[in-house]
Amino acid sequence: MINPFFGGYGIYILFSLPALLLGLWAQWRVQSSFRKYSQVRNSTGLSGAEVARRILSLNGLYDVKVEPSQGFLSDHYDPMSKTLRLSPEVYQGNSVAAAGIAAHESGHAIQHANAYLPLQLRSLIVPTVQIGSWLGPIIFMVGLWFAGTTVAWAGLILFGATAVFSLITLPVEFDASRRAKEILETSGLVYSYDMGGVHSVLNAAAMTYVAAAAQAVSTVLYYLFLLLGRRDE
């Protein structure tokens, strides 16, 4: 039986607070790093859109489109339409931060073209995650309090796909950043003295994915704790 001292919000905070603090720190770090290096012009003067197009061309990806998107740091690669969408600050900007982010998103297009396994796995479980992220907790709570542990386990497993997705995302994002740094260093799209800023921006962005994975895993562990505690009552 769960100790009342740790029950309710107390036990939830115990599980979630470390991941929450990590997430807040990661968001502060990525925004701080982006603000700093978005004010530093990259050595070649190329815009993020130009950097992306040149990287794609160097890898023979002439069928991948590069388009502007709306929203702050809304940059992403859409494998369904083979479109690389860059936020206004990145698409139009010629900063060190813009070059780094554009190269990172281009790295995802290269992964897609090369059938990078973690990216394929992540794409495969997207439908399950879209359903499980909101329906899983509902099924879990219904099972926990009304329908029995079998239903609760089903909800936990369904929501667990979210944690699996977050964990698979880590190698996908780390590899895209590795490709971006390597390409920028060897292609002449930026000069060597820009790379410190590129590393800072991409490393900070990587921590946001670590934080997201930690939050997803901590939520799964919290649900598991509730379920095991309920079973022992």
Image (cartoon, rainbow, N blue to C red):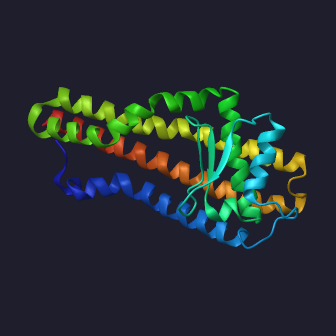
In the displayed structure image, the side of residue 206 where residue 97 appears, left or right: right
Residue 106 is drawn in which quadrant? top right
- The N terminus lies in quadrant: top left
Question: Residue at the location (45% across, 30% down)?
Answer: 125
Residue 191 is drawn in which quadrant? bottom right
In the displayed structure image, the side of residue 170 where residue 179 appears, left or right: right
Decide if residue 175 is in sight here.
no
Question: Residue at the location (19% across, 49% down)?
Answer: 3
- All told, the count of numbered labels is 0
Decide if residue 91 is in sight here.
yes
Could you say which is closer to the camera, residue 197 or residue 65?
65
Could you say which is closer to the camera, residue 169 or residue 52?
52
Question: Residue at the location (25% across, 30% down)?
Answer: 153
Q: Position of residue 163 (x, y in %)?
A: 43, 39
Residue 47 is drawn in which quadrant? bottom right
| Residue 162 in the image: above or below residue 39 | above
In the displayed structure image, the side of residue 170 where residue 124 appears, left or right: left
Q: Position of residue 180 (x, y in %)?
A: 75, 46
Question: Residue at the location (28% across, 37% down)?
Answer: 136
Q: Position of residue 151 (x, y in %)?
A: 19, 29
- The C terminus lies in quadrant: top left
Q: Position of residue 48 (x, y in %)?
A: 73, 57
